[in-house]
Each structure stands twice: as C-alpha cells, then as structure tokens.
Image (tube, rainbow, N blue to C red):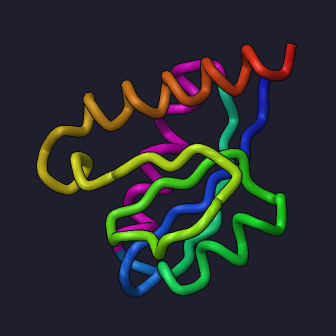
C-alpha cells in the first residue's frame, strides 16, 4: 500500500485538523493509500512544509503566504458538509503524486 504524509492545519492546530486528519486516514484506505498525519497551526505550516516531510497539506484556516513546495487542499468543505468534494480533491492530489513518482 502506498504511503503519504499529510500536514493538517487549523487555527488551533488541534480540534479541526484532527477531525480532518481522521477522515483522511479512514478514506485513504478505501482509495488504496495509507496516510499518516501531523496537525499544526497556520503559523507553523510553512516551516514544517519546507522541511520536506510532507506530501501535501490540508487546511481549514488560511495559510500564510509562502512557497510550501507541496500541494495544498482547502478542507473547509469538510466542515461545511462537502466531504465528498474535499475527498475528490484529495484523490486528485494523490493521483498526481503517484504520476510524478513514476
């Protein structure tokens, strides 16, 4: 099973990012991927992303301007009832990452 690391970002770095991360981990197995996550606050996101540990970022709070070097996925849809749309965007990112590995 393919493995990806995701940085999940929300305002406090705990509650919402944990909910998004849990949903990602559950759904990714159905898509044939294994995802590990780390939760963070927006102020930590750029430095963490530039450390090269993550394949992509999900966020429910605005990210500071900067070059994250990885795809970013807005997870607000997850909070507002558009879970399927959020997961579709994640699936697109995963497909693109897979394509780039080949």
Magenta-drawn stretch contains 23: yes
Quadrant of the rendered structure where residue 12 is?
A: bottom left
- Relative to 60, say whether 47 is above or below: below
User: On the picture, is 24 further left or further right than 97?
Assistant: left
Q: Position of residue 76 (x, y in %)?
A: 25, 55
Foreground of the two, 25 or 47: 47
Q: Position of residue 74 (x, y in %)?
A: 36, 51
Magenta-drawn stretch contains 41: no
Quadrant of the rendered structure where residue 102 is?
A: top right
Q: Residue furthest front?
A: 66
Q: Residue at x 63, y 53 (%)?
A: 6
- Relative to 85, say whether 42 is above or below: below
Foreground of the two, 102 or 82: 102
Our reading of the magenta stretch's main secondary structure is helix
User: On the picture, is 78 further left or further right than 9?
Assistant: left
For the record, the magenta segment spans: 16-32
User: On the picture, is 6 further left or further right than 60?
Assistant: right
Q: Residue furthest left?
A: 80
Q: Position of residue 94 (x, y in %)?
A: 61, 27
Q: Position of residue 60 (x, y in %)?
A: 33, 64
Which image quarter holds the N terminus?
top right
- Relative to 14, say whether 78 is above or below: above
């Amino acid at each position: 099973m393919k493995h990806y690391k995701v940085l999940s970002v929300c305002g406090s770095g705990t509650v919402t990012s944990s909910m998004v991360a849990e949903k990602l981990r559950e759904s990714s197995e159905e898509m044939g991927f294994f995802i590990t996550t780390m939760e963070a606050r927006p102020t930590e996101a750029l430095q963490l992303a530039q450390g090269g540990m993550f394949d992509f970022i999900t966020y429910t709070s605005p990210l500071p301007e900067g070059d994250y070097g990885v795809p970013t996925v807005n997870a607000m849809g997850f909070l507002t009832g558009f879970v399927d749309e959020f997961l579709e965007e994640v699936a697109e990112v995963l497909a693109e990452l897979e394509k780039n590995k080949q």
